[in-house]
Amino acid sequence: MAKNLRLKAARAALDMSQKELAERVDVARQTINAIEMGDYNPSVRLCIAICRALGKTLDDLFWEEAE
Amino acid sequence: MRYGYDEFDERQFKIRGEVYKHGWIFTVALLLVNFFVTDFLGYEWARAPHMFFLCALVSIGFFAVEAIVRDVFTGRQAWRAEVIPAIELIAAGSMFVAAFRKYFGGGVLFAEGGMLTRNGVALATAAVFAAVGIVALAKLARGRREARGQE
């Protein structure tokens, strides 16, 4: 699974740490790290919570264009 | 969005399941290897009761290392992640003392006739505890570095 750089960029744009984002969406910091590193495929429920916390849409952060 | 079970999130549930599964598979594989060595290859030394204890011990070590490496114990309750390496290393130290008293202290047993002080089980136990403790410490240090880097 590829790294999710869009999530990392959206979080950095709001000057938010992994820990702060994790607290907002009620998961562990390691889970946010794993999603950004491409080591964990989150549920739709968690994706939506992350998008709401960052003010983005699912397409913005998680949609991957077919090659 | 509350999960409400030990405050662990969805990823923790998934990893826990995988780690438990791997632990069971590893345990069964070790017991099958022991069975093969004793009954097919005919090595009588592998038939001793303490070999089953060693299989269980190594399985627990395997399970603990995988759990630590994959963050099973590093949830929100940070004290757990800090206590585990300490407990493991204290246990390893105690077992090393027991082993050295047995092998290098003129044959004085730490616990007279106990399984842990016979047949090298004490050394194996100490090695497993030490390995788990060192992995836990390394993981803890790495987690702290990551967290600092994100602040």
Image (cartoon, helix red, strand yellow):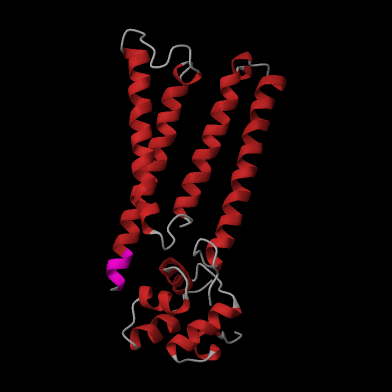
Provide residue A28's location: percent of width, then percent of height. Answer: 44, 68
Residue in front for this viewpoint, B53 or A33: B53
Task: Assign the magenta stretch its main secondary structure.
Answer: helix
* Quadrant position of the C terminus of chain B in the picture: bottom left
Q: Quadrant of residue B25?
A: top right
Provide residue B148's location: percent of width, then percent of height. Answer: 27, 67
Bounds of the magenta segment: B146-150
Point 65% across, 23% down: residue: B37
Q: Quadrant of residue B123?
A: top left
* B142 sits to left or right of A33: left
* B83 sits to left or right of A47: left
Residue B122 against residue A38 in the figure, above or below: above
Point 48% across, 82% down: residue: A50
Residue at the extreme top:
B106
Residue B79 against residue A1 in the figure, above or below: above
Provide residue B70's location: percent of width, then percent of height. Answer: 48, 56
Residue at the extreme right:
B40
Instruction: Say whether residue A35 is magenta.
Output: no
Point 36% across, 54% down: residue: B79
Number of on-image labels: 0
Q: Quadrant of residue B75?
A: bottom left
Point 44% across, 74% down: residue: A36
Residue at the extreme front:
B4
Provide residue A33's location: percent of width, then percent of height. Answer: 42, 70
